[in-house]
Amino acid sequence: MFKVSCIQLKSNNDFIYNLKKTEKLIQKAIKQNTDFILTPEASSIFSLDKKKLLKICSSMKNDIYLNGIRKLAKKFKIWILVGSIIVKISKNKLVNRSVLIDRNGFIKTYYDKMNMYDVKLSKKEKYFESKTFSPGKKIKKYKLPWGKLGLSICYDLRFPNLYRKLSQSGCLFLSIPSAFTDTTGKKHWHSLLKARAIENFCYIFAPAQGGKHYNGRKTYGHSLIISPDGEILKELKKKEGVITVDINPTLAKRLRKIIPSLKKN
């Protein structure tokens, strides 16, 4: 058994401000004796303005927000998944990157979002992430002290084959840090997450952005921790905060023995 915490934020366009907010919520999770903390997508900065991001973002090594979180992981001896930061990988290229940090503050692995959110929800609400970010090319997983974690980000949620590959490779936990739009979140968020849990018999850790942001964009919130049989173990609706749940990895293993649907044909 171990404890997992998901942090819900309403990030803006200021690295230091977002870091201070995250730190307060990490300290709150620490008081709940957690072992593993996850933050949402776009934790460090919330923007799709490529020109601005290219000016203010840096390499992973020099990222102000990430380095601050690494210090906290080391200080509190806690595992932390930074849901995503925006990393400048070349003069004109950015990636949306999820970063896993161990108890000593070391980066153990990272994942670059593979599926870009290019959608036209209405005449007024449009998103074209591919104009801002370069897509990742590699599926990533990591063996935590409690079992394997499969990494993903937000829109990846709509691509079930990704999660099937992760679960068939032995992942018991799936991280899905997100900044789901309020429009689609109301219709699809809970259903998609529960489906990914049930079809893969995995725990789902889904920290989210929630609220109306400085740029007018509305994110859905509703951070969730879901069991391998699709039960919502805890949910935080709109406000910033933290949810913490006891996780039993043997449940996922037991369900997979009872219903062997993950076996490769």
Image (cartoon, rainbow, N blue to C red):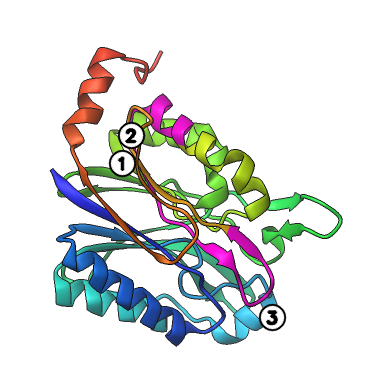
Check the image and report above or below for 157 versus 153: above
Q: CA distance from mark 2 to mark 1?
A: 5 Å
Q: CA distance from mark 3 to mark 2?
A: 39 Å
- Binning the other alpha carbons within 10 Å of mark 1 as few (below 14), some (14 to 19) or many (20 upward) gives many
Identified at 32% across, 35% down, the residue is: 227
Q: Upstream in the sequence, badge 3 or badge 1?
A: 3
Q: Quadrant of residue 220?
A: bottom right
Name the secondary structure under disc 2.
Answer: loop
Closer to the camera in the image, 122 or 84: 122
Closer to the camera in the image, 112 or 257: 257
Give amino acid for label 1: Phe
Query: In the rendering, at what x and y percent does residue 212 appear?
Result: 61, 68
Residue 174, magenta (yes or no): no
What mark, if any, has residue 20 been given in the picture? none
Q: Which residues are magenta?
A: 194-219
Describe residue 213's horizontal placement relative to residue 265 as left or right: right
The residue to which callout 2 is attached is 202
Query: In the rendering, at what x and y percent does residue 263 appear?
Result: 34, 17
What mark, if any, has residue 173 been given in the picture? 1
Q: Upstream in the sequence, badge 2 or badge 1?
A: 1
Callout 3–callout 1 Cβ contact below 8 Å: no
Identified at 44% across, 79% down, the residue is: 18
Residue 102 shows in this picture: no
The residue most toward the right is 123
Q: Upstream in the sequence, badge 3 or badge 2?
A: 3
Give amino acid for label 3: Lys
Callout 3–callout 2 Cβ contact below 8 Å: no
